[in-house]
Amino acid sequence: MKRSKPLAILLIAALMILSLAACGGSGNNASSNGGNTPAPSTNESTGGDTGEPAESAEPVELSFWSLGTTNYEELAKEYTQEHPNVTFKFQNTSDQTAHHNNLTTALSAGSGAPDIFMLEIAFIERFINNQDKFYNLYDLGAKDIEGNYLDWKWKQATSLDGSYQLGLPTDIGPTVVYYRTDLIEQAGLPTDPDGFSAAIDTWDKFATVAKDFKAKTGKPFTDLTDLLYNGLRDQSPDQIYFSTEDGSFIGDTNPQVKKAYDYTVKGIQEGWVGNWTLWSPEWQKAINDGEFGVLLGPAWMAGTIRNGTDGSGKWQIAQLPEGAGNWGGSFLTLPKEGKHPKEAYEFISWLVSKENQLKSFKASGLFPSIPAVYTEPAFSEDKDEFFGGQVISDAYAKSAERVKPVYYGPLHDQTDAFFKNALKNVLEKKADPEKEWESAVKQAKTLVDRS
């Protein structure tokens, strides 16, 4: 009985020690609870200022569905070297439709979605309104890096009320004027990029040059109706076919849409627009053989032009009249099925940082969406001999900084096809332009009513 009191004291002391140990350890084992508790970063450590990750960080595997040719798997390996507890499982495809359909299926089933999904801009409207299926990146810290990116690019993945950010920007596709210097010289025009850009810096001057080019060379100035129409359409202020306020169809009252349509009709009627079909073998052959003077297209279209080796050294890049547009680019999103949103966000924000966007540009040609990259010496160091020794990265950067934010809406592609088909009918069937316009407007309104 005399030993009972000391024993009780010892038991109480032991319990206190265990309790303190449990409290001290909780900060180092919190990375696998759905991301609700921050995992230790590489700036935190268990030994003062060593900078080493906490040894007790639990392993995290992030599944990543990537799209097309990127260097993301190589960069992920670099990330794992710095964060040994974070590894990746990639699933890559070049089939955009299957890629996005697979995600749609997984989200509908409630299982099978990855931690990280690379979302192409052409499909963004399918998902941006399904906010319950994706993490809001503003909740994970995206406000802190928003200012690093081109404003128009960031806004492509922002809800209309500005409260929700679906993804972080990866690459972009600023549009430019690709031109054949040999044909431009034949028409008596300046062949250097600055000089030719100045010669066509308004759409009125573009049309005048186009008509004169056709008269002197006997060839169309530009290749096809779709790309010419895109060039003007994408310079719409704020919205194209649909209202940002209520989603209603406004294509028939948007003056820029009518301007794009009428301008393309003018080119058809004056004979300086070619009659090739986008992506057809005949179009590719015409590019190679120099059958027209200019092609209005995005940065990634350079790859298509390079396929025609006979054109090496004969192509250069000028700026679009009166502004620019964008075609293509992606975002990195985090489906809510992912159990590690904090770790996933930390990785994607690192992956699309200034330093890594430059690496992706150099390794895979992904054109950066962070304008600070454009002033880096490594960005402008390469002269492209296919494009006459021009530093084409600078030409794309100039275009990228001229793009304005514009809203497309979920029915953009179907609606756009109505107007482009109308222009094809004017070109190929000599159809009445006004009747074709009215038909396109009617089809668009019917589509909206049925949706």
Image (spheres, grey):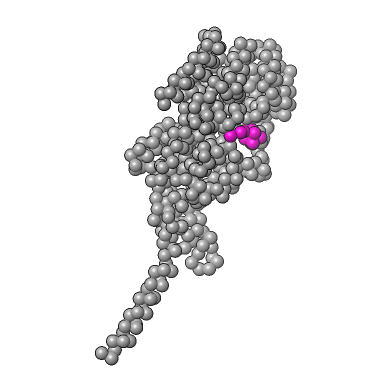
408 in relation to 90, above or below: above
Q: Is residue 305 left or right of residue 16?
A: right
Quadrant that contains the C terminus: top left
Looking at the rendering, the stretch of residues picked out in magenta corresponds to 397-405
Q: Position of residue 352 (x, y in %)?
A: 54, 45
Whether 114 is among the magenta residues is no
| Quadrant in the picture for the N terminus | bottom left
Does the magenta portion include 402? yes
Can you give x and y, in whole percent of width and height, for residue 438 in the image?
52, 14
Q: Nearer the viewer, residue 269 or 176?
A: 269
Quarter occupied by residue 266:
top right
User: Is 388 located above or below residue 442 in the figure?
Assistant: below
Q: What residue is at 47 percent from the left and 21 percent from the top?
A: 445
Vertical placement of residue 262 versus 387, above or below: above
Judging depth in this view, the residue of 74 and 297 nearest the camera is: 297
Specify the farthest residue to the front.
246
Asked if residue 271 shows in the view, the reply is no
Residue 272 on image: x %, y %: 63, 14
- Please report the residue visible at 45 percent of the width from the left and 24 percent of the height from the top: 448
Q: Residue furthest bottom?
A: 2
